Amino acid sequence: MDTDVDAGVDAGVDAEVDVIVVGAGPTGLMLGTELALGGVRVQILERRTEAQRNSRALTLHPRSVELMDQRGLVERFLARGRPVPGWHYARLDTWLDFSALDTRHGYTLLHDQARTEHLLTERARELGVPVRRGYEVVGLRQDTGGDGGEDRGGGRDGRAAAGDVEVDVRGPGGGLRTVRARYVVGCDGGRSAVRRAAGIAFPGTDETLTGALGDFAVVDPAALDRARAHGVLIAPVEATEGPAEGPADGPADGPAEGPADGPADGRADGPAEGPAVGRADGPAGAPAHARTDDLAGGLTDGRSGGLTRIVLIDPRRMRTPAAEPLTLEEFRTSLTEICGTDCGVAQPRWLSRFGNATRLAASYRAGRVLLAGDAAHIHFPAAGQGLNTGLQDAMNLGWKLAAEINGWAPPGLLDSYHTERHPVGRAVTENTEVQTLLMELTLLPPYQRPAAALRTLMTELLGIEEVNRLLADRISAIDTAYPPTTAEADTETETETDTGPTPVPDHDPLTGRRMPDIALTAAGSEAVRVYELLPPGRFVLLDLAGDERLRQTVTEGWGSRVTAHTVTHHEQRTDLDGVREILIRPDGHIAWATRTPALPDRRIERHHALTAWAGAPARG
């Protein structure tokens, strides 16, 4: 039963739900829709009273576009986005070539964050997910027994009911209300109130470097090429309705809630395309970093809907704290000092700084509280990975949390969210630190000459196809593969650890990798792509060898969780040679694959895999 502390609180918020998602940025919205697909009662609480107009992030990388494809949403995004066949790494002259990747979506999609949030909000509305704006989380408490963990948070005294999390919310009227959920997920940005209330540490490094960005309605097109030649990044930004909101200092996935364990960037993604390396006209030898024109063609216009984004690092101002307001006069001065022209910028819709504070949550889960997106990881916006990593967090977590709530999750499944995604967060924070260093060194006089030589070497290395492919796979997240676990092993012999299922040595090489979007024909259906089978958010079992009992067995035991298809023809790939069956997770990664030729043995393997991943079969 909810508690009204102040009669001024809006009663629009639901008193009890299965999951409260805090933060209506891209991560929170994506998670809300994933939970709804799993039949979970969810509501999203957002401190801001209106949708974000300013777009911190501008890009969707190949894996994120694949996720939209897997949910039947990709055409909505393509209709308003602009594909670019590559992206930068540390703003080196040679760009990463996404068109060579093993995907149908080998490009960066220029798609403003505001538009991404709009489309995901639209999707949430279609699935009946309420997005409650104007509600700020100010504290929470967990049940101290069972899975609830220790009583923590900044709310009122008292303890949550068994198996619940109580959340103290300040509503639009300013009053407090307590609402209850079985789980709470913090998607509320780098200064996450949820993370602090749950007592989850956020170790890392403080801000030491800042860049600047501006979205302008007026520029001098003739001056943009000169700015690019001096390392200033130019990108189109879709105009939004309404007046400029001024410098926004909240993170991409939600509001800034105050300092997070020391100075936090608070801007999370910042500009997703990453900063440009500005070059002052002073010290000799400071390099000018140009893009590779054939890969950057989508950026050459620099204008869309009347707005142009300009991003730079000014050597004379790169130690200015990100919290300090940025003025039009200062931005013009920086442009003039870097490239000899202020590019005629006028009528700014948004001016902001962003910093390189880098932090990674010690754990993505504390009892019944979980973290995703910038609440779990913040970093410099190098190569535009922040928003994309958050979307992929949400895709990994949604089906697992839904399984836990619906009562069929096998042991360790929910803990595997941390096991799988925390290493990804660490890899992203580390590669952004590397890229930041490659950019910053060029701005420091003692290091400019060797830094220029290092960047030249790195540029040459990116010209090697294998090296380019390695980094393109990594930045695009196409190479994300999760470690095999006991979910493949006999469920009678599997063991558990505090961090989730135990790794096992024997597994098919496909296990944990993303499923390629191959074309196939299933018995009794027309030709489809694999991703066209995934929008319902269920497991998909592909029988490539033909077992007349497979569909009946799956339907009887796991019919509400797994959809089985007997494949009569499929696109050939060498990595699928000899594969007889594949179990695809709801997030598009491969849970289990077998090349066992003997049908009786394969049926035993299948039963174990289904039970370990999709839970115990229904009792007939």
Image (tube, grey):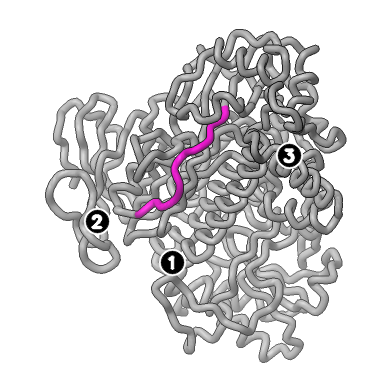
Q: Using the image as rendered, state which of residue 334 and residue 494 is in the foreground.
A: 334
Could you tell me which residue is drawn at 68 percent across and 37 percent down?
Answer: 442
Amino acid found under the numbered disc labelled 2 = Gln
Residue 330 x/y as whole percent? 55, 14
Task: Please give the residue where the numbered disc 1 appears in the rendered image.
Answer: 415
**Distance from the alpha carbon under mark 2 to that under mark 3:** 55 Å
Q: Is residue 71 left or right of residue 183?
A: right
Say if residue 491 shows up in the picture: yes
Dot 2: element: strand
> Which of pointers 1 and 3 lies earlier in the amino acid sequence?
1
- Could you say which quadrant of the image residue 107 lies in? top right
Q: Which is more foreground, mark 1 or mark 3? A: 3
Q: Which residues are magenta?
A: 201-211
The image shows residue 569, relative to residue 218, as above or below, that is: below
Magenta part, dominant SS = loop
Task: Please give the residue where the numbered disc 2 appears in the rendered image.
Answer: 142
- Could you say which quadrant of the image residue 436 lies in? top right
Q: Using the image as rendered, state which of residue 98 and residue 242 is in the foreground.
A: 98
Residue 560 x/y as whole percent? 52, 65
**Label placed on residue 449:** 3
Amino acid found under the numbered disc labelled 3 = Arg
Dot 3: element: helix
